[in-house]
Image (tube, helix red, strand yellow):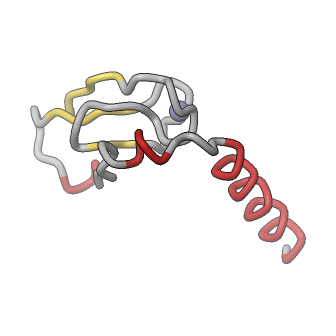
Amino acid sequence: MKKAILLSSVALSLLFGACGNSSTTKATFEPCDTTKLKTGEAYYQCAMHPEVNSCKPGNCPKCGEMELDKKVKI
Ligand SMILES: [Zn+2]
């Protein structure tokens, strides 16, 4: 179990570390808790990373240049 946690944290740090030039995109990224959204409210999600949800349009902090898709809470 401990090994899995260690591995995932290493993978996460690798993901974030790989995006050295993501500091400019980070400014526009505002994490959004979609579970707190009401029906019909819009949020922005990365096509590659469903866990990346932003309240504002912008780029995915993980991909760097991948633009977030507009989604509507159902
Ligand atoms: Zn992404």
Q: Position of residue 15 (x, y in %)?
A: 69, 47
Q: Is residue 57 above or below residue 24?
A: above
Please state if 48 lies on the left or on the right of 1 as rendered: left
Q: Residue furthest bottom?
A: 2
Nearest to the observer: residue 60 or residue 42: 60
Please state if 70 lies on the left or on the right of 25 as rendered: left
Place residue 74 in its image quadrant: top left
Place residue 24 in its image quadrant: top left
Q: Position of residue 62 (x, y in %)?
A: 56, 40
Residue beneath the point at 49% across and 42% down: 61
Please state if 65 lies on the left or on the right of 30 as rendered: right
Residue beneath the point at 17% across and 48% down: 37
Residue beneath the point at 37% across and 27% down: 68
Please state if 44 lies on the left or on the right of 67 as rendered: left
Residue beneath the point at 30% across and 33% down: 44
Q: Position of residue 66 (x, y in %)?
A: 49, 23
Place residue 19 in its image quadrant: top right
Nearest to the observer: residue 74 or residue 41: 41
Q: Is residue 24 above or below residue 48?
A: below
Q: Is residue 41 above or below residue 15?
A: above
Figure label count: 0
Q: Is residue 14 above or below residue 40?
A: below
Q: Quadrant of the N terminus?
A: bottom right
